[in-house]
Amino acid sequence: MPEPQRTLGSAEVERLVQREYAYGFVTDIETERAPPGLSEEVIRLISRKKEEPRWLLDWRLRAYRLWQGMTEPRWAKVSYPPIRYDEICYYAAPKSAVAEGPKSLDDIDPELRATYEKLGIPLVEQQRLAGVAVDAVFDSVSVATTFKEKLSELGVLFCSFSEAVKEHPELVRKYLGTVVPHSDNFFACLNAAVFSDGSFVYVPKGVRCPMELSTYFRINASETGQFERTLIVADEGSQVSYLEGCTAPMRDENQLHAAVVELVALEDARIKYSTVQNWYPGDENGVGGIYNFVTKRGKCAGARSRISWTQVETGSAITWKYPSCILLGDDSVGEFYSVALTANRQQADTGTKMIHIGENTKSTIISKGISAGHGQNTYRGQVKILPGARNARNFSQCDSLLIGADSGAHTIPYMDVANPEAQLEHEASTSRIGEDQLFYCRQRGIDPEEAVSLIVNGFARDVLSELPMEFAVEAQKLLGVSLEGAVG
Amino acid sequence: MPSAAAVSEAHYRRQIPQLAGSPNGRRRAEVLGEFFRCGGFPTGADEEWRFSDLDALRRTEYRAYPPLSGPPRAEREEGVPAWTREFGHRVLSSEGRCFDLAAGRRSPELHFAALTLPGSEDGEAAEAAVLPPWFGPGWPGGGEAANGTGAALGASLRRSLDRHPLELLNAALAGGGFRVSVGAGVEEAEPILLYSKRRDTGDGHPRMLHPRSVIELAPGSRATVIEAHDGASETGGWTNPTTLCRVGADAELHFVRLELETGNLIHTSRTTFRLGRNARVFSTVLSLGEAQVRDDQAAVLTDPGAEADFAGLFLGRGISKADQHTLAVHVARNSASRQLFKNVLTDRARAVFDGRVVVAPGAIGTDARQTNRNLLLSDAARVHTKPRLEINADDVRCAHGAAIGRLDEEALFYLRSRGLGRMDSRQLLLRAFAGEVVERVPVPAVRELAEAGLSRLREDRSAATGALSP
Amino acid sequence: MTSLLEIRGLSAAVEGKEILRGLDLEIPAGETHAVMGPNGSGKSTLAHVIAGRDGYEITAGEIRYRGEDLGGLAPEERARRGIFLAFQYPVEIPGVNNTYFLKAAVNEIRKHRGEPELDAVDFLSLMHDRVQLLDFDQDLVKRPVNEGFSGGEKKRNEILQLTVLEPTLAVLDETDSGLDIDALRIVAEGVNRMRSPDRSFLVITHYQRLLNHIVPDRVHVLREGRIVESGGRELALRLEAEGYAGAVPAPV
């Protein structure tokens, strides 16, 4: 006789998915800020602060004028009250970082240094993180970049966006907006108008970047949005692995983060872009948290180039992002690996676009959505095969893990095919943490919280294994922390 | 005649069938008003209608077929294809008017008929049957579902269920249709054919047809119903059938929508299913003609144990298009849905699959599967597919898969190496691909139509040259 | 000598349905006992109640293990005290590495005993030994827990875990089901090698076949939720010859 199976009560699971946010502190630092609201004046002010050339100011203003006539996209499966764009402060910077201009690592404001220590990102070129160069962005400005000199010996340019505009204007001008035009979408357009900093990377021909490059984004000031812009150019035959991390203080207000990332991979170049996103997600009632509305896109411009996106999205009240690949070069490859965790009242609508234009282009999509509590998780993706993309290949897999009866998991893949030689495969499944799995782990002596974390990590393994080692551990911990319970 | 501007509400108001003394005349006008208030014909900006360009509908002054003069003409049956004669149970209609009414007269346990209004003696009965109290304009079944599950299902879903624009238009303009009712516990072994054919009226006016049919299976009954649409047009025409199915507890309905229309026709259908406890529906769409097709099917599973199993096969030739929208809403516990849609495309044919599974909060034990497979046989064929899962309960089994590709060259080679000719090998593989859907149809005559359709798919030489096939 | 496991007058219900009805069973340290019974007699329920699975409610009686009442102890607390259940249907845990899983389990148990946790090197050498002993496929050790394992591989994985975790009381729930004769022999050898004066086994099975390989000290017949007959190994042979119908009927 098969014995009756008991299902896992949602109250039990709720307890297991309570979460604490470890990075919610505020740094008390003197901040210079623009008056709230958006106007041409504010944009001119940002541009002046950055000592930008005329063409860049004009580009910003063009974007701003266009943006004024645009409406916010509403097609995503997320809901939030209207954003008051006139109440946001578009520029905030620690005084110490602006007043005296760029300085050496030794001169960083001790408050800022302590902040990054606390976040686990020491701004020193020390042994433990010897393999990782860091650009630290604090509110609207970059406050430090490590290992710059060591990298420049190889010709690798790694600096803040503002510095790049000053030092390498020809490169910035050549590539800025070529992947994500200023007119691309509402949030990208806003970013083009007001972006204040971000990171810039250029890897010259044939160079394999010897260390991981990373940017750590920190929002600190209140009522402030963060609008950074990252541009990575990998010249012919070069390779680079880049990662970004992000945190913000716990506040009752919602703060807007509208970033743009552009990647350009020329012939035979490879770019691996990894994100561990841990913005403040809001509390268990959905109060506060970051609105993460981000446009990320890479262009495989050259033949045999490859762009790989890996993201672990555990934070933010709302995530709206679709890191995409334009596969222009023949034989180019696009990859998207994603873990998105939504707990409490978090909402995520995330996925990718793979646009196949060149011949023999290939793309792979692996998406793992985890919904806990009242979390709402949507995978939205598009694979588009254009008529000239002979012999294109795509494989997509979207799996959802549901934890608790009130959570939601949605899968919306679009596939548009205009070439008969294309081969596309899409699979999706849903699962839950079974009571039998939990009991099995517990019978072997493992705590229920630990068991849940183990099962969640196992579910996400195909994606986590794509992360560089240093960050895989961090990401694994985050998935564990996010789900850590109040049990026992 | 097509005109630049959108056709007015007043034009459509004039097309409402007039029925003296019927309270429904006024109700129809209200429904028509509702259609225009909700925005009229959807545009491509509406996600649900992205690939169904209704511009031609919006701008064409379609007219209803002129009223029937004289008694139904039985001799028209000569224009009916031979395969229909294999059906013992059949009702035939042309231009929305029955002409083989007598064939449908049966006992109260099994009743089927074509209904025409106005003009036929059966007009009042038709009106009552076409707008039964349990299916108003829109869909109370959908309303119940939406009310029962609150906001989680969202406004767009409620619109898909309650305010489907073409269903509203059909309710306002329906001039007739079919009615099938099967009594409690009746297991009807012989399939029932509902055959409808359209033609041009010869006066150059594009004509529209809004058949509104009702299929009712009482608890514990079983039946197979084939709804076939045939005919062609040179002046252009529009067929917009709505079929409302109610399947009682423990009843089982095999429903086949057979689309054979060719020529300059737009075909938009709407089929809804209301299922009782442990009721089962097997619905299969065979799109074998050469029209611009949009099919919407929806099932709301409000009772435990109900099962909705949808499948479709589209054989695309020329510039034909099939846009298949299938929606399964799981509200009760332990309900199941399946979607299996296959497309074979040559020439410049286009296929769209928009499958949607919604699991309402609390609908635990839901089992939902979606599959969409496409074979592209020409350079200019296009596929858009969007299998959607929206899950709001945790203890469920949901999965979907989609694949797009060519005929397997290796399999083709294997068959040829065993001595089969290229065309035969190809035909064999196509049959194997389509078989999964075709085999579901429990009627040999209909399966043969599908097989014949498969052999009509010509070898497309453009795949090698890049040129469009003639 | 007190028994390692003492079950007195145990009644247990699952979802309100009483399945065990006043069961008595005693297993002294170092002994191997078999519980046999027809389908639906409550064999698996007994295993799950001993392991403390949620949803199995003890309505009367008690289970004492090393003199301690197990009632109220969570499954992981029982596991850490040395109770091991080899599952009839071992569960798949996708993506979780078998070795990692077992290391986490070993260290939880060691922590409970106040022993230092094993580091990766020590643990891997322990695993290596045990894997060799069991003739276990190295590849399976690196794969996710039970994912894509055949029925036989899953059962062998249970025995591998048994040999690594070294419990004091091992409950084998129909470990023989779905095993071919070679796999059965390997599993039985693994178990026999573990037999020692301070370790007890409770072997739950429907068929006598397994008991040819794991020879029990005592055999009990379970029927309708209670032990209706106990005896030596010959009882199992008799049951095989006569079927359960021949066993003493349960008093009504």
Image (cartoon, rainbow, N blue to C red):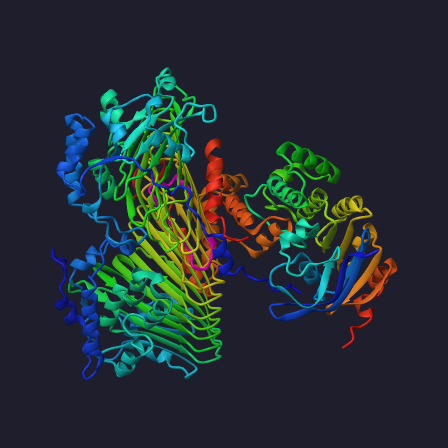
Would you place residue C230 above or below residue A253 in this image?
below
Of residues C207 and B455, the one nearer the viewer is C207
Looking at the picture, does residue B151 appear above or below residue A157?
A: below
Between C68 and B21, the one nearer to me in the picture: C68
In the image, taking residue A251 as reference, residue C85 lies left or right, namely right
Point out residue A87 in the picture as x, y percentages from the top left corner.
Answer: 20, 46
Magenta part mainly helix, strand or loop?
A: strand
Rendered view: A190 above or below B83: above
Q: Is residue C223 left or right of residue C124?
A: right
Q: Is residue B385 visible?
A: yes
Question: In the rendering, at what x and y percent does residue C59 appear?
Answer: 66, 69
Using the rendered image of the protein, determine whether residue A411 is visible from the camera's viewpoint. no
Depth check: give the residue in front, A49 or B426.
Answer: A49
Q: Please identify the residue farthest to the top as the structure is shown.
A: A153
Above or below: residue B333 compared with residue B344? below
Going by the image, does B129 lie left or right of A8? left
**Which residue range is magenta in the image?**
A402-424
Q: Report if residue B64 lies within the magenta region.
A: no
- Coordinates of residue B274 in the picture (x, y in percent): 39, 70
Q: Position of residue C131 (x, y in %)?
A: 70, 38
Query: Residue at point 61% right, 64% down?
Result: A4
Q: Quadrant of the N terminus of chain A?
A: bottom right
| Count of numbered tags | 0
Left or right: A462 as drawn, with respect to C183: left
Give the residue displayed 21% in from the left and 81% down from the top: B23
Q: Magenta includes A413?
A: yes
Q: Nearer the viewer, residue B292 or B274?
A: B274
